[in-house]
Image (tube, grey):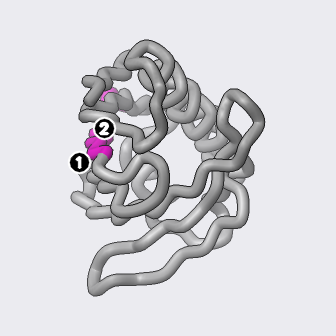
Amino acid sequence: MVFILDEGSTFNAPLSKVWELAQSEGKHSHPSQLNMKMSMQGEHPILDFDIKAPDGQLMHNTIRVTNIPPVGFILDYTGGAMKGTKLIQYYIPKGNETGVTMVGDAVSSMPIPDAQLRAMVLQGLDAAFKEDVENLKKL
């Protein structure tokens, strides 16, 4: 298990707009998440997708999302290579900007050294953040 802390990112948008994006359909896309399928389990969106691992292989993930408006959300990896990973993303309102912090524990069923797992998770978070910066421009 690897502790993850990713803080200091800021969206150039107020919290209301960030949350609008998080709740939107069709305007919120992540090209880094391949073969995306979404379903619902009660109030929880279930995301099934593949990502490219550093070695180029596809890694499947299933994530149960718990939305906590307007604070953020919990990502619970319920299937795939990172099953058991739990991450919390929360927002910090800063007027016309919104701070973003991600904290949690990452695990992998693959034999990956802790430093490599941490780097892989942080790289994925960075890609998702950059995609959301672009998504916010479309609102």
Q: Is residue 54 above or below residue 31?
A: above
Locate the N terminus and report the quarter of the image it occupies: top left
The count of marks equals 2
Q: At 71% across and 57% down in the image, what residue appears?
A: 34
- Tell which circle, 1 or 2, labels the residue nearer the N-terminal end: 1
Query: What segment carries the magenta color?
Result: 85-95
Q: Is residue 77 above or below residue 47?
A: above
Counting other residues with Cα less than 10 Å from the Cα at mark 1, is it few (<14), some (14-19), or many (20 or more)? few
Mark 2, secondary structure of its residue: strand
Counting other residues with Cα less than 10 Å from the Cα at mark 2, is it few (<14), some (14-19), or many (20 or more)? many
Residue type, label 2: Tyr
Quarter-of-image position of residue 88: top left
Marking on residue 91: 2
- Considering depth in this image, is 4 or 74 the residue closer to the camera? 4
Observer able to see residue 9: no
Q: Is residue 12 above or below residue 118?
A: below
| 134 magenta-colored | no
- Considering depth in this image, is 19 or 80 the residue closer to the camera? 80
Marking on residue 71: 1
Q: At 60% across and 61% down in the image, what residue appears?
A: 49
